[in-house]
Amino acid sequence: MKSSRAKVLHEVFYRPMLHHVLDSVAPLNPDTTIVIVGHQKEAVTAILDDYKVTCCEQREQNGTGHAVLSARSLLADFQGTLMIINGDAPLLLTEHLEQMIEAHSSSGAALTIMTTTLDDPTNYGRVISDSFGAVRAVVEEKDADDRQRAVKEINAGIYIGDAEIIFGALDRVTTDNAQGEMYLTDIVSIGVGDGQMVNKFEHPYPNHVLGVNSKVEMARAQRELSARRNRELMAMGVTMYDPPTISVGADVTLGAGCRLGAAVTIVGRSRIGDNCTIEPGVYLEDAEIGNNVKIGANSVVINYRVEMATRLAPLTLLDGSADKKNHSQE
């Protein structure tokens, strides 16, 4: 990411990356959700106040397998299914996690991993399968030979399986590899070697499940999340004249019959009343807009209440950050 900030703290579509992942998990109603923290643990923990999660510290950065092992004490009395998800995949959808859980449950497998296929699988662990398509191993790129690197099916970094089996396999993972780390992916070959069924859930949309590893990928994720939000709003009756240029945060409320011009941005906890017209280039942040308001092009309204039926001229600036203020026709 070329940044001093922990990756999961980077904001994508106005929220930390980790929030998007937790939001996709919450509807699954898990018995417990554990967030493993390490780098910048205090900053990561600080953004989790609104979530029902337990934080667990990975005291030394010794690989993905070691990270999961660090949560073992919190699951000492847990007997059941464990799902492991990376914290840097903001485009995950709950429905895909539900489908994976269903596929795992119906297959009778001890472990299921999510996979996807890339035209260019560089930097990802390759999923090695036998001639019947059954998973045999996941090999990280730095440990792969030329034949394995030619494989385009990759590990998407999501696992589901019996907690006892997963931790039992992790007890046998070594650091004998190119990076000198405990790979979580090694539980696949260990399970296969023990004669257990290891299944795969193939995800058709790579961009929805892969982690964000660069500012370019972060921008792509931002566009996708914005597009999803806009589709949701338009389905509710909001008119958007140029959707790709319009950005409306997840915490914004838009009333019935609203019309948004090109390049409009509405963020924070803005509340927009019914039948409002927001002309091109307007920026609204934590704004309260009454019904039947028209806001002229390129105006800015921050932390301000605009009363119903008001008409704001183009290029109006209303900033009530110091204290809440009202603006009306009078």
Image: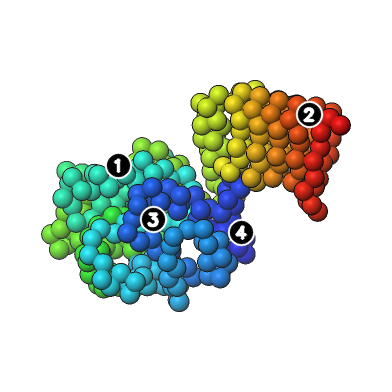
Q: Nearer the viewer, mark 4 or mark 3?
A: 3
Residue position marked by numbered label 2 in the rendering: 310
**Which numbered circle lies on residue 121?**
none
Q: Residues within 10 Å of mark 4 (few under 14, many from 20)?
A: few
Query: Label 3 vs label 2: CA separation?
Result: 48 Å
Q: What's the amino acid at mark 4?
A: Lys
Residue 231 locus on image (x, y percent):
52, 30
Circle 3: residue type? Ile
Distance from disc 2 to disc 4, alpha carbons, whole Å, reads: 46 Å
The residue drawn where x is 29% and y is 63% is 186
Residue 319 appears in which quarter of the rendering? top right
| Mark closest to the chain's N terminus, 1 or 4 | 4
* Comes first in the chain, label 3 or label 2: 3
Residue topped by disc 4: 2
The residue that disc 1 covers is 99
| CB within 8 Å, label 1 to label 3 | no
Q: Please rate how many residues cluster around mark 2, counting C-alpha atoms within 10 Å: few if below 14, some from 14 to 19, many from 20.
A: some
